[in-house]
Amino acid sequence: QSALTQPASVSGSPGQSITISCTGTSSDIGAYNYVSWYQQHPGKVPKLIIYDVSNRPSGVSDRFSGSKSDNTASLTISGLQAEDEADYYCASYTTTITRVFGGGTKLTVL
Amino acid sequence: QVQLQESGPGLVKPSETLSLTCAVSGYSITTGYHWGWIRQPPGKGLEWIGSVYRRGNTYYNPSLASRAVLSVDTPTNQFSLQLRSMTAADTAVYYCVRDGDANFDYWGQGTLVTVSS
């Protein structure tokens, strides 16, 4: 199985909104609404911030939102803050009952 | 509160088999969910290794399926990973996770495994 495709890096200024894309196929992202997103600060454990495409776990800021269209999922962060600077990963369930991650996106807050 | 804790060797010799165990507290693995392993080589991204269900059903990353074995030990509320024929490319932080169909909601702290002679 191939990894999901994410941009290597994105950047934005405080207060702005950014969107990170995650492109897969009809065998993963396009097949189910089982797409999740993770935030990882340097040296820290990844943290689930979006599950089932667009749901936020308790305690996650509503500045984080997720969506999906066909084979591409997206994570949008609004009102960008310095603390949002981190690596972001998407993941998806697949039709072969496996899981697959994206390569990760480094977010820089300018 | 669900907590996961990995245990195992920090150093493995090339060609040897890695054995890691994940102890789960605050939730019985017999209740539900899959339980999985994810790894992250230094400076690189996340890679799903595989997941195991409470009844022992296992699912593996095709790229690791020939070398990985996952199992559950319900009496001790633990699950394990064995990865054989280790090479330097397997050097990584290994995380155990609770897996809700690719929604990994609880993670262990991670354990660094280095492959070196």
Image: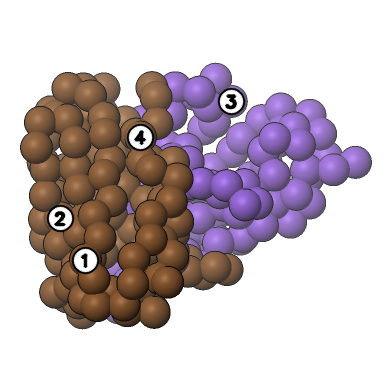
Q: x and y percent of residue B3 in the render?
A: 39, 71
Residue type indicated by callout 4: Thr
Residue type indicated by callout 3: Arg
Q: SS of the residue at dot 1?
A: loop
Tell me the residue at 14%/74% (across/down): A62
Measured in 3D between alpha carbons, the distance from the residue under mark 2 to the one under mark 4, in whole angstroms, is 16 Å
Chain identifier, brown in the render: A
Residue type indicated by callout 2: Gly
Measured in 3D between alpha carbons, the distance from the residue under mark 1 to the one under mark 4, in whole angstroms, is 21 Å
Instruction: Report the mark closest to the observer, 1 or 4.
Output: 1
Q: x and y percent of residue B89 in the render?
A: 70, 35
Considering depth in this image, is A66 or B105 the residue closer to the camera?
A: A66
Check residue A66 in the rendering and tell me which mark sits there, or answer none.
2
Q: Which residue is mark 1?
A: A17
Label 4 is found on which chain of the structure? Answer: A
Q: Relative to A37, does residue B58 appear above or below in the rendering?
A: above
**Taking the image as drawn, is residue B52 in sight?**
no
* Image quarter of the N terminus of chain A: top left
Residues tagged 2 and 3 counted as in contact (Cβ below 8 A): no
Label 2 is found on which chain of the structure? Answer: A
Lateral position of residue B24 relative to residue B44, left or right: left
Q: SS of the residue at dot 4?
A: loop
Q: Earlier in the sequence, mark 2 or mark 4?
A: 4
Q: Which residue is mark 3?
A: B67
The tint chain B carries is purple
